[in-house]
Image (cartoon, rainbow, N blue to C red):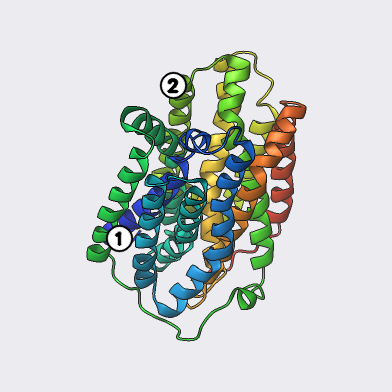
Amino acid sequence: MAKNKKPLLVLFSVVLLDLIGFGLAVPILPYYVKNFVSEGGVELGLLLSIYAAMQFLMAPFWGRLSDSWGRKKTLLLTMPGNIIGLLILANANSLWMLFLGRAISGIFAANISVATAFVSDLTSEENRSQGMGLIGAAFGIRFILGPAFGGILGEQWGLDAPFWAAAGLVAINLFYAWQVLEEPEKHHHERSSLKAALTIPQVKKVMLSNFFYILALVQLETLFPLFMKDHFAFSVKQVGYLMASMALFMAFIQGGLIRRLTKSFGEKKLILMGCILLSLGFVTLSIPNTWLKLLIPLGLATLGRGISQPCFFSFTSFLADKHNRGVVMGGFQSAASLARVFGPSLGGLLYDWNFHSPFYASSLIFLIVLGLASSFIIKKH
């Protein structure tokens, strides 16, 4: 890890708040949309998709800018944009303002590629997976904090309250980042490009793998509350507690255990083992007839994600030098964002057809990722 852990904690909070900004809108948007249209199903789907679509388009741009202009400068530029998007959502009095706020938030939340490149710059190759584990932990924590934050504040203080609160937290984080972060040493002054980065051996393969990996994960993220409600009669609070337990387990793995595991097994083996565990967890998810038995496949899937996701981040960072790491991580994030554009709709269609099918499909997709990852060659610089 970096000698001074403060910068890593700042970057963790940047990513976490970006992700919470997405998650807190999930329980709020259906009610917001109903203020402007009678049905709202199509509009709600588009609002959820436009955020991921903007991330898909903008992540390589921010990554490329950070390569040529600087990590800290780019990060500090994007954070006020995220605040603006949240404030527009807080003050939205028409449907077009909702779309504008979501689009702006998606554009500037694409700075996750900059944060991951920053983490790569601050950590040694031996400790890269532990640093990336913090990023992975942020993904796990937002799984519960985002919707919970949005639901509780929205119910207590109004639909706009979560957006005001999130904007305030990002503003505090902006000041903290300005004070604590230091620009990493520049190793190159030429402008990088995604087209050039795609010529790097294995970059296309790892981006394709990440697309399929996130496409499979999204099925559980999207459908889990509905699945628990339909088949185990769980309340919103009960689902929240179960998701919190999963997130804490994953945070424990990615926040501390991952360093020991990577030293013992290496990134590639952990990616392969993670895909196997995820495939087993998903294929057995619909078998249990009680929620206690369900903890076994959920535990397998959570463990699989916990050990594989930070290693995916680390492996991708190993493919690039410092001068093009931002754009490579941007392409990596774009692949994930593209999966989040199509994944929820695909999962919903499959679930309506047969509730087993999205989990079976995800299990198969993880085997595809396993096949792609088996040919990864880790070459550290």
Q: Is residue 198 above or below residue 237?
A: below
Kind of residue indicated by mark 1: Pro
Please state the horizontal and vertical placement of residue 171, each as a whole percent of the image: 28, 55
Task: Give the residue displayed 59% in from the left and 17% down from the top.
Answer: 293
- The label on residue 237 is 2
In the displayed orientation, state which residue is furthest to the left.
179
**Circle 1: element type:** helix
Q: Quadrant of the N terminus?
A: bottom left
Left or right of 333 on screen, residue 24: left
Please state the horizontal and vertical placement of residue 96, each as a whole percent of the image: 52, 51
Kind of residue indicated by mark 2: Lys
Q: Is residue 229 above or below residue 337?
A: above
Task: Give the residue displayed 40% in from the left and 52% down from the top.
Answer: 88
Q: Nearer the viewer, residue 128 or 362?
A: 362
- The label on residue 157 is none
Q: Quadrant of residue 292?
A: top right
Decide: few, some or many residues near mark 1? Use Cα within 10 Å; few <14, some 14-19, many ≥20. many
**Circle 2: element type:** helix
Distance of mark 2 from mark 1, alpha carbons?
35 Å
Residue 276 in sight from this viewpoint: no
Please state the horizontal and vertical placement of residue 119, each as a whole percent of the image: 40, 62
Left or right of 46 on screen, residue 1: left
In the displayed orientation, state which residue is furthest to the right.
353
Task: Give the residue displayed 58% in from the left and 59% down from the top.
Answer: 56
Task: Give the residue displayed 42% in from the left and 58% down from the top.
Answer: 127
Residue 193 in sight from this viewpoint: yes
- The label on residue 7 is 1
